[in-house]
Image: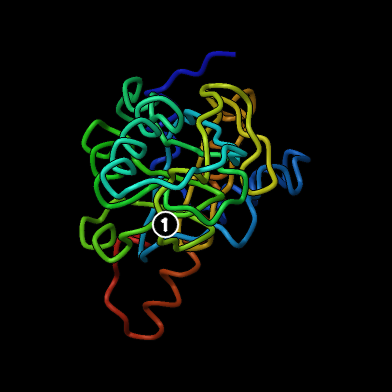
Amino acid sequence: MAVDREKILEKFAPLRVADVCDAMDWLMLRNIGLMSRDIRPLFRPVKVCGIAKTVRYVPTNKIVPTMSPEEYTKFVEDWYANVCTYPFGEIIEPGDIIVIDAHDLDVGLLGSNNSLAYFNKGARALITDGGCRDTDEVIREKVPVFCRYISRTMVQARMEFESMNKPINCGGVLVRPGDVVVGDGDGVVVVPQEYALKVADIALKVLEEDKIGRRRLYEQAGLPLDETVL
């Protein structure tokens, strides 16, 4: 089922993960799409929504022979060019969220260079059940990355590209190309695309009721009103 991207992105833009989770409860979609709590944003506050593009990486069983540093440089270049490639970078559209099944591997598939390149192409966030490295720089660049691990290693001799834009498992949930992904400081929730508009409509009501209640409490406490209650 195709989604109306612009309509979906507009409706989900103000929503929090909590609003979306509540709406899914009301639609009898309890616990569907709730990624593992181990998958967390690198920095807060952060708030993203987008349309999923999916990619899958798997562990390698290739053996690395003993070689000189010069030979190893060529080995690494070949690995990136032919084994652990990043072809999804060529199909990113504005409004996408890249969701990566990295097979729960503590490997720095994402880092300060490639994550910023994908962000510049229009990706709103990158979400992986694997790792990200160069995290101080990623945080400085303000690229929204949600990951299971803060990693240190490169990908060569550790993982291989398997497929993209197919259904994947990320954080224990099914993610399909075109599903809606919402992430913030509470974590990540994935909304099946066929329910997206219904979920958004209910979630917007949840959010508005919350704003009314908290605005009243702000006023009682003498707090200045901010964007979360207006």
In the visual, does 27 lie left or right of 211?
right
Mark 1 closeness class: few <14, some 14–19, many ≥20 residues within 10 Å: some
Residue 167 in the image: state x and y as whole percent. 63, 26
Q: Residue 174 falls in which quadrant of the image? A: top right
Along the viewing direction, whichever of 217 and 105 lies nearer the viewer:
105
Residue under the point 50% across and 18% down:
3
Q: Residue 124 falls in which quadrant of the image? A: top left
* In the image, farthest residue toward the bottom: 221
In the visual, does 108 lie left or right of 25?
left
Which element type, helix, strand or loop, lies under badge 1? loop
| Rendered position, 173 above or below 183 | above
| Rendered position, 156 above or below 39 | above
Q: Residue 97 falls in which quadrant of the image? A: top left
Residue under the point 54% across and 46% down:
205
Residue 58 in the image: state x and y as whole percent. 59, 37
Q: Residue type at mark 1? A: Thr
In the visual, does 105 lie left or right of 143?
right
- Which colour scheme appears in the figure? rainbow
* In the image, farthest residue toward the top: 1
Residue 4 in the image: state x and y as whole percent. 45, 18
Along the viewing direction, whichever of 35 and 203 lies nearer the viewer:
35
Along the viewing direction, whichever of 6 and 141 lies nearer the viewer:
141
| Rendered position, 218 above or below 27 | below
Which quadrant holds the C terminus? bottom left
Which quadrant holds the N terminus? top right
Residue under the point 41% across and 44% down:
126
> How many marks on residues?
1
Residue under the point 38% across and 44% down:
125
Residue at image mark 1: 153
Residue 118 in the image: state x and y as whole percent. 29, 36
